Amino acid sequence: MRIKELVAAMLAAVGVLSLEGVAHGQQAPQGPPSSPPDAQAQKARWMRELNNWGRWGTGDELGTLNLVTAAKRAEAMALARTGVVISLSRPIALSEASATSGQSVPAAGPFFEMRVRSPNPPNPAGDYNVDLQSFGYHGMAYTHLDGLCHASYEGKLYNGYAQDEAVDLQKGCRKMGIQLLEDGIVTRGILVDFPRLRGVASLPPTERLTPADIEAWEKMAGVKVSSGDALFL
């Protein structure tokens, strides 16, 4: 398995900004953590050398999701045997207090609030229960998929788009919005079970995992990761 295929598959799976990808660069070093100044310089170097800008043309807005081709989707659908659907979502928890009252911009943290209008007393001729929902899902609280317009670096988004060119503060993302994925992502998903690989119940938060660990999992599980696969780590 080539590192460029591995990382491209991971980026397609989680929808992170493709300018972080190393799809057509060299493998990033796996040494010990750098000091803050060195880490910033290293990040700047990776962002210049290990990105996908221009790989699918100057006007591309999909990034590594280009690897999920029609042939890849057909291959994935042919693997289905039982038709069982497994959700990766989490239950929505209502906020204790309004996170939006009096604010002109969204709250920094995730929240979900709902207001309901219910006929009282009930109308014998019929009526409706109506709800208004407000939510901010960025963070680790709610399952979501980010569009490529979500993150920027030095004022640029994926493929070199300028921040003010891609994002409208009133209407949202002009470029690389999540609406580009309106048909969803259909591809082969591979679960990489690192605790099983290590022979333990769970891994400590400080455990560092590298592409070599994924290659070891491939060998142990007898599964070969290919370009366009979605990895669940």
Image: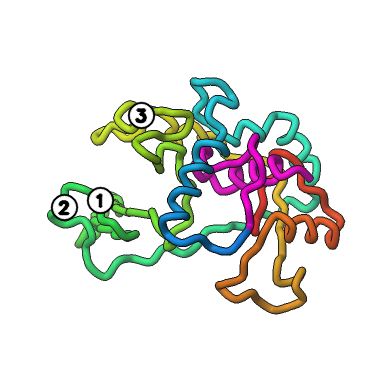
Which mark is in front, 3 or 2?
Answer: 3
Q: Where residue 134 sits in the image (x, y, percent)?
A: 29, 53
Say the numbered circle drawn on residue 103: 2
- The answer to whether residue 17 is left or right of residue 81 is left
Residue under the point 60% across and 35% down: 65
Q: Position of residue 197 (x, y in %)?
A: 77, 69
Residue 12 sits inside the magenta stretch:
yes
Q: Residue at x 51, y 34 (%)?
A: 182
Q: Quadrant of residue 119?
A: bottom left
Image position of 70 with respect to 128: above or below: above
Q: CA distance from mark 2 to mark 1?
A: 7 Å
Q: Earlier in the sequence, mark 3 or mark 1?
A: 1
Q: Is residue 87 left or right of residue 216?
A: left
> What residue would you read off at disc 1?
106
Mark before the other along the chain sequence, 3 or 2:
2
Q: Amino acid at mark 2?
A: Gln
- Taking the magenta stretch, the answer to whether it contains residue 76 is no
Disc 1 packing (10 Å; few <14; some 14–19; many ≥20): some
Which mark identifies residue 162?
Answer: 3
Q: Position of residue 26 (x, y in %)?
A: 66, 41
- Give the class, few, some or many, for how many residues have Cα within 10 Å of label 2's Cα (few <14, many ≥20): few
As helix, strand or loop, the secondary structure at mark 3 comes to: loop
Which three-letter amino acid code belongs to the residue tagged 1? Answer: Pro
Q: CA distance from mark 3 to mark 1?
A: 22 Å
Q: Are marks 2 and 1 in contact (CB under 8 Å)?
A: yes
Residue 233 point in image, percent of width and height: 65, 59
